[in-house]
Image: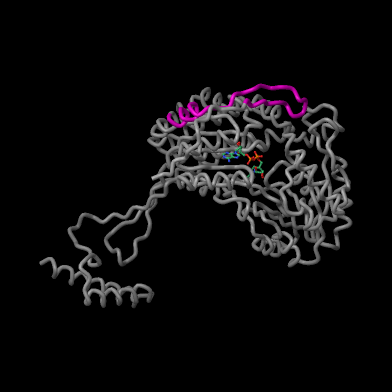
Amino acid sequence: MAISTVSPPFEGTMELTIKNPRTGELLYTLPEAAEAAIGQAFTKARAAARSIASLSVPQRLEECRKLKRYISLHKEDIVQRIVDETGKPRTEAILTEIYPALDLIHHYEKTAPKVLRDEKHPTPLVLMGKTSKVYYEPMGTVLIISPWNYPFNLSFTPIITALIAGNAVVFKPSEHTPLKGLLEDIFEKSGFLKDVVQVVYGGKEVGSRCIDQQPDKIFFTGSEAAGKAIMAHAANYLIPVELELGGKDPMVVFDDVNINRCVNGAVWGGMTNAGQTCTSVERILVQQSIYPKFIEELKREIAELTTPANCGSFDDKNIDIGCMTAEFQIRKVEAQIQDAIEKGATVHCGGQREPGSHVFPPTLITGIDPSMKIYADETFGPVVTVMPFKDEAEAVRLANDSPYGLSASVWSGDLVRADRVARAIVTGNVSINNVLATQGNSSLPFGGVKQSGMGRYKGAHGLYSFSNIKSILVDRNSGRYEPIWYPYTKEKYGLISRLVDASFLGGLAGLIQVALVGLKLERLEKKRHL
Ligand code: NAD
């Protein structure tokens, strides 16, 4: 039985105030969902869970195709909503929010029917005459809680995965970028199966109250601290959780690379989405012999980036870096940089926001050490640090010197070495001679290790993680009694002991022994039932 919580009813105390981070203009306000509304959302989703579960996988995909069509038709409007609430450039909104959502549906159209179909499994000789299968069934109603940095991609992609696996969804977006009404519009106006996705708005208290509704699974993307709180809360009810948390990604650069291309990748990997990406490049580790040249190139490349400070028009599609989304996050980044400066680090460029704005210029820091917060803490802003290394062993040691293990990149002309280093880094994803590239392939599972979380989504693993994986063993109604059932006797013990030895002998001799002992056990059983 689940342990019930004793929290008093929640009336939704907060009003969400959503402003455009670039202009400060008020976009809208939104009351937080109260307990009754949260309860209603779960009631509706649970009722609708039956309708989606009863559809075949191709029928669920047909529903998702409606979403794909609707999003493609309205992509410019959706991009505008995302840009308004996050402050990111249009190019990033379309490339990293819209494209992955459409691509995931496209990928599952080709793969999901096969991934989720009933599977026949081998049955060992000792279970002769029986058949074994696995069914992938929906879990029921899943709760998806999302962060603010990719408010469309990081909500829509887990929602789609959960739906294709046959679940209903209650979704709680971030209180900072809720994209009020957008998902509801997409689902309703595209003609998607009614009520299967419910959205509840609010802050962490609303998220917490959703957990008290005891969903069948929680898929959480966000900070390490919230992930731990959610896992502890879910433990009360033994709800399975998947945690997609923060990162401090290393980029390991050996001296046999094309420095220009590598620097280009480092700058994009560190600055895309103004560095507010869980898998952004944060720690660039460069082999000593090319370190001075690498730093020079990095400074040159960063100086060429267009930001709202040097570009003028923010909506310009030529802009490289937008502004940061949340004031609290800017303060965290500023505090980390201040701490690093006080402890002796060198800031080569950037380091401070443009006064009175959310514009944070791209920042390059060297001379860091483990005493500084910036060494190990996630830096959720357009900031990269660079450290030299001597050889492969030191590169691996530095890359692994982190509480996080979300993603990494390894750069080398020697692909054998790059592969060796990719294997040695304790992480969930590695791109070789590229950055953030594993996420570009919807077939590859995504997730982290260490403090970056647990579980995988996307690809086949994503569908499995939203499924109840049910094992079936069929014994035809043969009338045969099982020789291993009661009663246990001395004679039976002797035969079972021989069966254990024979089972792992291997080869033809092993097979013959298993068959012979099996026959003897059956004969023994038959005698008893004569
Ligand atoms: P956050 O943890 O503060 O909030 C994320 C969501 O969780 C929000 O919707 C919030 O309301 C909710 N929440 C917070 N505490 C809760 C609680 N106790 N119970 C229920 N819900 C709760 O994170 P954020 O600031 O929105 O996002 C930034 C973080 O997300 C960064 O650490 C970043 O690395 C991480 N992130 C990870 C991935 C990934 O895929 N691994 C992707 C994007 C962002």
Residue 145 visible in rendering: yes
Say left or right for 426 vs 273.
left
Residue 106 visible? The answer is no
Name which quarter of the figure residue 392 lies in.
bottom right
Quarter in which the C terminus is drawn = bottom left
User: From what the image shows, is residue 508 above or below residue 409?
Assistant: below
Which residue is nearer to you in this view: 30 or 246?
Answer: 30
Indicate the position of residue 353 as horizontal and vertical percent values. Answer: 83, 37
Residue 69, image x, y percentages: 55, 28
Quadrant in which ligand 1 is drawn? top right
Q: Quadrant of residue 92?
A: top right
How is the structure coloured here?
one colour
Quarter containing the N terminus: top left
Which x, y percent locates residue 407?
A: 66, 52
Is 71 placed left or right of 304 in the picture?
A: left
Task: Say which quarter of the image contains residue 404.
Answer: bottom right
- Taking 350 as reference, is 121 left or right? left
User: Is residue 24 a member of the stretch shown in magenta?
Assistant: yes
Residue visible at 81% across and 37% down in the picture: 360
Instruction: Identify the residue at horizontal 45%, vertical 26% (top origin).
Output: 194
Magenta stretch: give its range: 15-43
Between residues 69 and 505, which one lies in front from this camera angle?
505
